[in-house]
Every structure is written in structure tokens, then in C-alpha cells.
Image: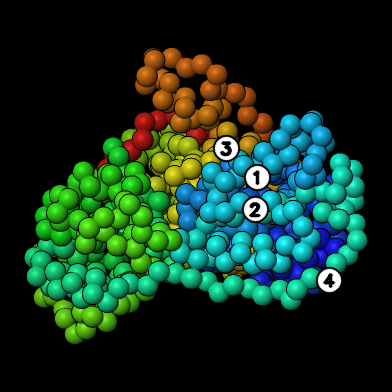
Amino acid sequence: MHAGEAVAEALREEGVERVYSVPGSHIHPIYDGLSRVKSIRFVTCKQEPNVSLMADAYGRLTGKPGVCVVTAGPGCLNSMAGVAQAYGAASPVVHISGAVPLKAAREAFHGVDDPAFVHGMFKKITKWSARVERLSDIPEAMAKAFHLARSGRPGPVHVELPRLSDYSEFILQQEPAVLPEYRPIATEVPGPDARDVDRLAKRLMDTRSPVIAAGKGIVRKGAMGELAELSMKLQAPVIFAQDAIGVIPEAHPFFAGHFQQHRSHPLCAEALKRADLVLAVGMRAGTAEMSELRERAPERDLVLVGFDDAADARYDGEERRVADPKLFLAALLERLGSYQRPREEALIRKLAEGKAAVRASLAAQNEPHKSDKPIYPGLLMDAMNAVLDDHAVVASDVGNCQMWARTFRRIATPESFMQSGVWNAMSYGLPTAIVAKMEFPGRDVVALAGDGAFLMTIGDLPTAVEYGANILMIVLNDGAFGQTFMQQSNLYGHTYGTAFQSPDFAAIARACGAEGIHVTDPKEVEGALRKGIAATRSRPALVEVMAGRHPYPRI
């Protein structure tokens, strides 16, 4: 078979269901191979950055590797942001690309002086980057790529396949070859040590006020049920990193909010003040979130079960171990057995009162702005909560919209409020929502973005229409890169280069075949969202909200 057919066979054998791509001459053979694999659904995107963002979203939503294919040079570099984002988010992604020839001349087509420069760049943002040099190596390289993407702490990998010559239609070689049978490599995850589980169980049973700090590893491994059960068994509040919002529902009696520098949930701070042991699960040693947690919890009272491929020098001592979050929580629950801490009525009541107080405070802050034009963002957030049920998916882009939604959004599942994560690449909302609607066609799916972020990703609004991904897109239009506009105002007392003239987004939506709704009156926001949701029964919809610029709400 040819190289493109070898790649297509690997994807079929790995059970890949969907591939996201933008075409290019360096990857024609892969397209040709995939054209004969009927089990794989192909999504042709219009903007290369969205290709990897969609693969990242697929990895997060399904737990299976999201696969994207891009052409050499510009295709690779245009899609780097989504790959780096997947690395930070622990999302399994297999990023496949064409490449310039192995011995390419300087200034080759889609190249620079070093033929392997793209391969070198991807080494820093992936678990593994491979530049395949022989056709016969494709099966082994692809099997390793999928194995590493799934194993341990999941993440992205990069595989590039050089063209035979600058303008050749072939990858690696013109002549077909007989290749070995493709053999997938089983996923490997680090299991918990029974001695560690036993020691920790005894320590937890001896504590008076334990707190569980949950990281995104619990979401990625689908261990939310085990987390909620452990919380009830220990009567322990659950706090979580801001990129793990959704790891426990807001309605759970021991929900205690997220922690982050400067804007932690007030319940989080209260829980940590009373803690005599903090059990952190699903985070990594040496990360910013662990530094933040360590500042709030004394070193001797903080135990970390890390979400990593394996322990390294950062995991020193008995208080830092590495284990798959789901396997660890299951083992700990089994070891605790019939143990049940007496019901902490006073604590449960205090947490419930704290949640109610936060909601009351937000409502009070909205009250003076109910007639504001442009529209106060908090009113939009309230309307979203009123219109969307607990099964709805909300994918928030980066910027002010993210900060408002993080504060207001009612959380029931990890999909209640999806955000980019530590990499924080703008243009996250639309591609993530498209993927979510394809995977969960029976759920309402909303993409939330400011006008600046949406302009970075708008090219794939026609893709949503084309593939029947009937999402509701909500765009906050304030004519600026709002977050940087506000930061400049606060720092310098003036702004520069952060305001711009936005187009008529509702008209653009209609031109793309979607419903377009324009809202200027705060009294019409909820009705516009309901009209948009109704429209998504047949096509995508966009609601453009003319939003004002305001400081973030206080919690």
C-alpha cells in the first residue's frame, strides 16, 4: 500500500470515528486513503487553527483520541495552539501532518532551511513527536502515537510524513510496499500501590476535617461518581482547580467551589481554613494550581495523588504519588469499605447557605443594571441559566465572557461550562461547540464568545451549517478585545489598539445559512435565547448581544 493508505488503515484499526482537517497538497495521499474507509466520518474545516481545537474537544468529550490532519509548514504551525491546549488540558489528540521532503532544499515549498523544524517545534508541546522516514515504519509509529495519546496522563502526539519531493503526489516513496499487520498497543495507566491506599485510608479515618481538592484528571478519567461518593463517605468538602469546573455538581452538598489566584470561590477559602488534611487527586506536581493550593494548605497536611504518566523528581516523599485518578478513587473506596463519617449537618448547612449567598449577591449586583443599554453581561448570564437545562453544553471562549460565565453559570456536569484551560487560546468556543453537537445531538449546545474571539474563528460557522451541527452561538459585541481593553484601562488609565469596529454578526449568520438574532434591549435577552434554541431544531443560530463593559462581578 501507499503511505496514505497505511495511515488510513491505522486510523481504521484504532477505531477512529471522525477526522478533522483542512486539505493541502502535502496530505493528498492521506485523503485518498481515507476516501475508502467508510467507517470514518470526515469533517472539512475552513480554518486550520480550528482543526486541532476540534480534535482537542473530541478528546475531552469522548476520552478517545481526537484526530486531525493538516498540511506541511503553515498547516502545522496554524494548528499549534490547539495542540498546546490539548497538552495543558490532558486531552488525547493525534495530530498528523504532511512535511517537506527528508532532504529538502533550503526554502522548500512550505519549508525553511531545516526540513525537520516543525517536528522540533512539536516536541515541546506534545507527549511525543515523530518524523517518519520510511514507509515501513508507519504502522509502528501510528500505533505508538495512539498508545501514548491514551496512556497515563493523556495528551497530544504529532506524527509527520514527509513528501517524496517538493511537488510529488507521494509521501515517502512512490512504490507501494507490503507492510506488517497493524497491531494497536494497549493503553497503560499507573495503578495505585495498595500500601499507599491503606496508609492514606487510615489517615483519612483519623482526621476531623478533611477536604478533597479535585483536578481535571478526575474529569478526563470519568471518575466524578467516585469523587462524589468519597465526599459523602468522608463528609468532606470538594474544592477544585478552575479548569476542573464541573468535576462535582453545584447541587452536591459538599460542593465548595474552585480555587485560582485572586478569584477563588469564597466557599473554597472557608473549607481550607478548617481542613486538617487536604487530599489532592487528578492534579500534577509542579503546576501553578498545586503552588496555589500549597499556599493555602500547610505542606504537612497536603497529600497529592498525581495525574501523570509516572512519578518524577517532583514526586518526593510519601505524600506525593502518581496513580490513575479513577483507579485510585475506586481502590480507596474499597479500602474504606463500610466506614462512614457521621453526617456533618452544620457543615452541610453552612455550605448551602454559602452557595445561596453567592447567588443572592450576584442577583443584587444585576439589579441596578436591568435597564442598561448596552446590556449588562450579568443579565445575559442569568438568562442563560433560565433558558438552559442541566444537560446543556456551554463552551466558553477566552476573555470577559469566560470570566462572567465562570461566576454565574449553574454547574451540573463537566459540560455545563467548558473552557480552554491553562493555554487559554482564543477561538475555543465555536469549534468545541460544533464537536459537542456532533457527539451529543440530543443536547442543547451553546458557544459563548466575545466579538474579538469570535472573529478569530468565524470561518467555521459555515462548517456548523454544512454538517448540521445546530448549535446556539452567543456573541457579546462590545467592539473591543474586552479583557485586554479593561486591563489597559486599569493599568494605564487609557487604552490603545484594543478597540475595533465589529461587523453585523447576526447578518453574517444569516448569510451562512444560520438564524441570526440581534439584541439591544435587556428585556429581550431571554426571549432571544429561547428563539435561538428553538431555531437550533433545524439549523444553527447566532444571538448577538450588544454588551456593555463592566468590572467583573464580586463573589
Foreground disc of the pair 4, 3: 4
At mark 3, the secondary structure is helix
Q: Amino acid at mark 3?
A: Ala
| Disc 2 to disc 1, C-alpha distance | 7 Å
| Disc 4 to disc 2, C-alpha distance | 22 Å
Residue underneath mark 4 = 178
Residue underneath mark 3 = 453
Quarter of the image holding residue 372? top left
Q: Earlier in the sequence, mark 2 or mark 1?
A: 1
Where is residue 197? Give x, y as percent: 24, 73
Residue underneath mark 1 = 119
* Mark 1 neighbour class, 10 Å CA radius: few under 14, some 14 to 19, many 20 or more: some
Tell me the quarter of the image containing the C terminus: top left
| Disc 1 to disc 4, C-alpha distance | 27 Å
At mark 2, the secondary structure is strand
| Disc 1 to disc 3, C-alpha distance | 28 Å
At mark 4, the secondary structure is loop
Q: Earlier in the sequence, mark 4 or mark 3?
A: 4
Residue underneath mark 2 = 130
Where is residue 173? Give x, y as percent: 86, 56
Q: Residue at x 73, y 39 (%)?
A: 115
Quarter of the image holding residue 554? top left
Q: Earlier in the sequence, mark 1 or mark 4?
A: 1
Q: Amino acid at mark 2?
A: Ala
* Mark 4 neighbour class, 10 Å CA radius: few under 14, some 14 to 19, many 20 or more: few
* Mark 3 neighbour class, 10 Å CA radius: few under 14, some 14 to 19, many 20 or more: many
Q: Residue at x 15, y 49 (%)?
A: 298
Tell me the quarter of the image containing the N terminus: bottom right
Does the residue at mark 2 contact the one at mark 1 (Cβ under 8 Å)?
A: yes
